[in-house]
Image: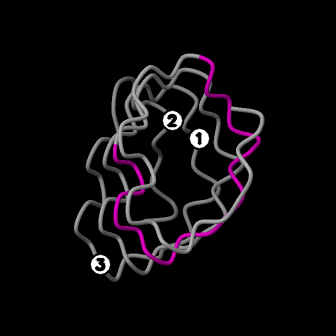
Amino acid sequence: MPQWDVSNIVWKLKEAFQDRSTFNADITGWDTSNVQNMGHVFKRCSAFNQPIGGWNTAKVDKFTKMFYGATTFNQPLNDWNSGKVQGFYMTFRDAVAFDQPLTSW
């Protein structure tokens, strides 16, 4: 999975790992520069805690429920470009471990 080429995903990663409670693969090197929708990607992925702060999010318009219920996730995301994001609804709901600054968002 870490070797998957996602650089050609033009629209969405939506729900890619939703409800995969044990998912914690190293996907830090993924090229997400073309992704527009990251809604629900890690929803209820209770084990996920990888450093994905280097992902290119410049084209993303939806972070809706992205980390909803990702109870272990606590990685820096402050460098993400959220300038086009219109959907932040419940992005971190029940992500109880998340305690990172998002001041640049």
Q: Residues within 10 Å of mark 3 (few under 14, many from 20)?
A: some
Residue at image mark 3: 21
Instruction: Compare marks 3 and 1 and give the one earlier in the sequence.
Output: 3
* Distance between mark 3 and mark 1 Cα atoms: 23 Å
Q: Main secondary structure of the magenta part?
A: loop
Residue at image mark 2: 7
Horizontally, is 74 left or right of 78 in the view?
left
Query: Which element type, helix, strand or loop, lies under badge 1?
Result: loop
Q: Are marks 3 and 1 in contact (CB under 8 Å)?
A: no
Residue at 59%, 32% in the rendered image: 57
Position in image of residue 11 (x %, y %): 35, 24
Q: Residues within 10 Å of mark 2 (few under 14, many from 20)?
A: few
In the rendered view of the protein, which quadrant contains the C terminus? top right
Amino acid identity at mark 2: Ser
Q: Which residues are magenta?
A: 65-83
Instruction: Compare marks 2 and 3 and give the one earlier in the sequence.
Output: 2
Residue at 34%, 83% in the rendered image: 22
Residue at image mark 1: 31
Amino acid identity at mark 3: Ser
- As drawn, the label of residue 14 is none
Q: Between tags 2 and 3, which lies in front?
A: 3
In magenta segment, residue 67: yes
* Distance between mark 2 and mark 3 Cα atoms: 25 Å
